[in-house]
């Protein structure tokens, strides 16, 4: 009998033993024995604390989360949620602040009397265009006062021009002839607004009496350095800070707020990202080594994000198991019909599932909005484990065959 005839039974026995050993290892701990980039579909959906249409709790996982399948109702609720960062309704409803005199302002004060021979206009003053006197310009001091002859010091800080005029006239009424007063602002050095951060040139300026809006102040500073969709504008007022994305301010006139004295505007870059893991992208592409993708527009959809990540891998992906992980607001889940009693806090771990084998899901993913720090995970198809098993088994079988043939 030839050597090859002896090799065949040996190779066959080696192949059977290697296959049996590999199968035992694979079935005993498939998740650890065979390579994988994340949980399988049943590993995500099975332990869910709540599901749309079946809100009852199942097991008691270490972290409770909800799973929802994308449908028209879920997508409509997500679309109605609107942008993430906006100024509060209280700020949006505030009108132009009435600018009052402050420390450092320079004022011009003119006093009129009904006729000559009064306190300020002597009888022999001669021909004049009017019975008035203009006092030297003066700056509101640190005490907040201005000095008026025969009236003493009069509080000016916190008063409007009309209020200060009436206060001065009241002080002079017993000595001057029916005095009338006009107060003019020569130079404003109070009611300042500061613009700092990622602008062309940080500055500090005084509000005009006619008011100033947020975008006008940023324009004074030379504009922002980055694209509007990745620029965050923070307004500090009265010890409270609120923020909004620059693109939303440009698009919504109600967010172009009226500024108030002592406001501080901070412009900063806040580039938003999403993550894409699992069976996405083309593995042969060097660009797919980066699984963190920036938003390239103000709004992007789930379909945009999957496409940006390179799409689903034909040889690995399970199109019915496209998941999006995020912390969802409790009121949003309640509008989607999820029972939230089992969860604590206002931010609930949530998994959205898109079944791309269903053509209607293709349209739904184009409407579902992405948020900052969303995580997309595409599960492997069930057949992937078989292919991995064969990739492990075949080299062992080939080694056994050649080893047996050499005996």
Image (tube, rainbow, N blue to C red):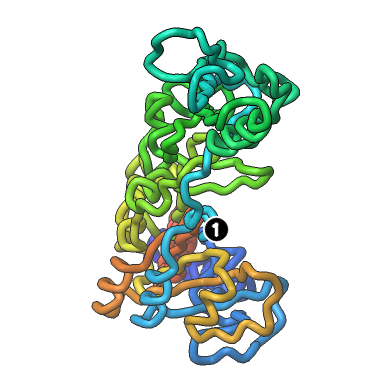
1 or 69, which is in the foreground? Answer: 69
Q: Nearer the viewer, residue 89 or 206?
A: 206
Percent x, y of residue 45 = 53, 79
Task: Name the residue at 41% across, 46% down.
Answer: 256
Q: Is residue 359 above or below residue 392?
A: below
In the depicted structure, whether residue 166 falls above or below residue 44: above
The quadrant in which the N terminus is found is: bottom left
| Above or below 139: residue 234 | below
Q: Nearer the viewer, residue 58 or 283?
A: 58
* Secondary structure of the residue carrying numbered label 1: helix
Residue at 59% x, 30% y is 101
Quarter of the image for residue 156 reads top right
> In this image, 321 relative to 314: left or right?
right
**Residue 138 appears at what percent x and percent y?**
60, 15
Q: Relative to the observer, which residue lies in front, 77 or 136?
A: 136
Q: Is residue 363 left or right of residue 7?
A: left
The residue sitting at 40% across, 71% down in the picture is: 80
Query: Is residue 129 among what the camera can see?
Result: yes
Q: Tell me the crowding category of disc 1: few under 14, some 14 to 19, or many 20 or more residues within 10 angstroms, Cα based.
A: few
Tally of marks: 1
Q: Residue furthest right?
A: 143
For the question of whether residue 263 can be seen, the reply is: no
The residue lying at 50 percent from left, 24 percent from top is 112
Quadrant of residue 217 in the image? Answer: top left
Find disc 1 in the rendering and name its residue.
90
């Amino acid at each position: 009998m030839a050597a090859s005839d002896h090799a065949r039974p040996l190779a066959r026995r080696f192949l059977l033993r290697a296959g049996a050993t590999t199968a035992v290892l694979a079935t005993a701990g498939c998740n650890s024995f065979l390579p994988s980039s994340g949980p399988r579909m049943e590993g995500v959906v099975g332990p869910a604390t709540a599901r749309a249409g079946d809100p009852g709790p199942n097991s008691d996982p270490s972290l409770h989360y909800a799973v929802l399948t994308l449908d028209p109702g879920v997508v409509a609720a997500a679309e109605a949620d609107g942008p993430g960062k906006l100024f509060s309704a209280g700020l949006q409803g505030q009108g132009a602040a009435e600018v009052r005199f402050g420390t450092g302002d320079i004022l011009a004060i003119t006093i009129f009397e009904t006729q000559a021979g009064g306190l300020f206009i002597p009888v022999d003053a001669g021909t004049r265009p009017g019975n008035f006197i203009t006092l030297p310009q003066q700056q509101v001091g640190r005490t907040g006062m201005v000095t008026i002859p025969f009236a003493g010091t009069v509080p000016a800080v916190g008063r409007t021009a009309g209020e200060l005029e009436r206060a001065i006239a009241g002080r002079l009424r017993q000595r001057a002839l029916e005095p009338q007063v006009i107060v003019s602002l020569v130079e404003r050095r109070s009611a300042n607004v500061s613009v700092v951060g990622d602008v062309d040139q940080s500055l500090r300026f005084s509000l005009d009496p006619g008011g100033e809006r947020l975008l006008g102040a940023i324009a004074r500073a030379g504009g922002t350095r980055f694209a509007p969709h990745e620029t965050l504008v923070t307004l500090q007022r009265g010890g409270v800070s609120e923020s909004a994305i620059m693109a939303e301010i440009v698009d919504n006139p109600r967010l172009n707020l009226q500024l108030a004295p002592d406001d501080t505007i901070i412009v900063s870059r806040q580039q938003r990202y999403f993550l894409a893991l699992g069976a996405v992208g083309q593995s042969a592409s060097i660009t797919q080594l980066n699984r963190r993708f920036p938003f390239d527009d103000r709004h992007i959809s789930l379909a945009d994000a999957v496409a940006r990540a390179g799409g689903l891998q034909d040889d690995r992906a399970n199109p019915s198991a496209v998941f999006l992980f995020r912390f969802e607001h409790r009121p949003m889940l309640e509008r989607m019909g999820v029972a939230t009693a089992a969860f604590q806090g206002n931010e609930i771990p949530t998994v959205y599932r898109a079944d791309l084998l269903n053509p209607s899901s293709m349209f739904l993913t184009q409407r579902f909005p992405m948020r900052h720090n969303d995580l997309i995970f595409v599960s492997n198809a069930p057949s992937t484990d078989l292919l991995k098993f064969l990739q492990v088994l075949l080299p062992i079988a080939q080694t056994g065959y050649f080893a047996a043939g050499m005996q």
